[in-house]
Image (tube, coloured by chain):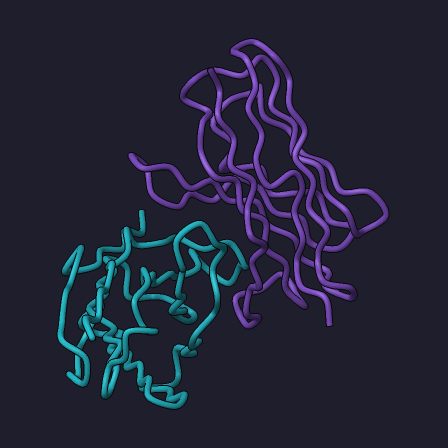
Amino acid sequence: KQEVTQIPAALSVPEGENLVLNCSFTDSAIYNLQWFRQDPGKGLTSLLLIQSSQREQTSGRLNASLDKSSGRSTLYIAASQPGDSATYLCAVPPGNTGKLIFGQGTTLQVKP
Amino acid sequence: GAGVSQSPSNKVTEKGKDVELRCDPISGHTALYWYRQSLGQGLEFLIYFQGNSAPDKSGLPSDRFSAERTGGSVSTLTIQRTQQEDSAVYLCASSLGGTSTYEQYFGPGTRLTVT
């Protein structure tokens, strides 16, 4: 059974720092991995989707990497801003289906 | 274009009552998903619909939970005889297809409180 873990559970950094969020999964036979952002009281916003054949994806200041063999993904945020404060979740599908298994999330606070 | 919408945004109900939660997916999206987010359990998959195929109900926690999707568009999640442990945020998502290839787009959720 696939399990997804995110470390740390919470992170507080000063504005301008580069930071890394971690996601690990127990079954390396994944089709893809998706990173989401959730603001308090809101739904999820998709940030990046990395297919199993890819090693990384970039969008603006965000870069996500995927290492299937070690069961890990990282989300790198460059030059963090207070507006980046949110909960970040990673998720993988159990097989080639659309349903997702989520990690518990990392709550990020960027202080001005 | 319009995103995924859900109604109501908040629902307070008494234990034992039935509730219905509604989801309007993005137009043209054939796949629709329901998830539940609670403090203790995180974000859990409940059920998903893909086109005219039989829904995948493998995440429904009990037979008090059911969902339908009419006309391949709007979906309703029904919880019968609500219990306090049903209190959570119920999120709906849709995607262009039902495989892992497609990104999912989430609605704002319905916060259900059972008193």
Which chain is in purple here?
A: B
Q: Is residue A15 above or below residue A98?
A: below
Residue sitting farthest toward the front: A112
Which residue is located at x 78 percent, y 64 percent? B27
Res A60 quadrant in image = bottom left
Residue at image position (67%, 57%) is B31
The answer to which image quadrant residue B25 occupies is: bottom right
Q: In the image, residue A102 lies at what x, y percent?
A: 36, 54
Question: Chain A shown in which color?
Answer: cyan
Image coords of residue A21 (percent x, y): 20, 70
* B90 relative to B66 in the view: left or right: left
Vertical placement of A27 versus A76: above or below? Answer: above
Using the image as rendered, state which of residue A105 and residue B12 is in the foreground.
B12
Q: Position of residue B79 (x, y in %)?
A: 60, 23
Count of numbered labels shown in the rendering: 0
Q: Image point 62% across, 61% down: which residue?
A: B98
Q: Is residue B70 left or right of residue A40?
A: right
Q: Residue at x 22, y 65 (%)?
A: A109
Q: Is residue B24 above or below residue B26?
A: above
Q: Quadrant of the N terminus of chain B?
A: bottom right
Q: Position of residue A3 (x, y in %)?
A: 27, 51
- Which quadrant of the figure has residue B34? top right
Between A59 and A25, the one lying in front of the other is A59
Residue found farthest to the top: B16
Looking at the image, which is closer to me, A104 or A33?
Answer: A104
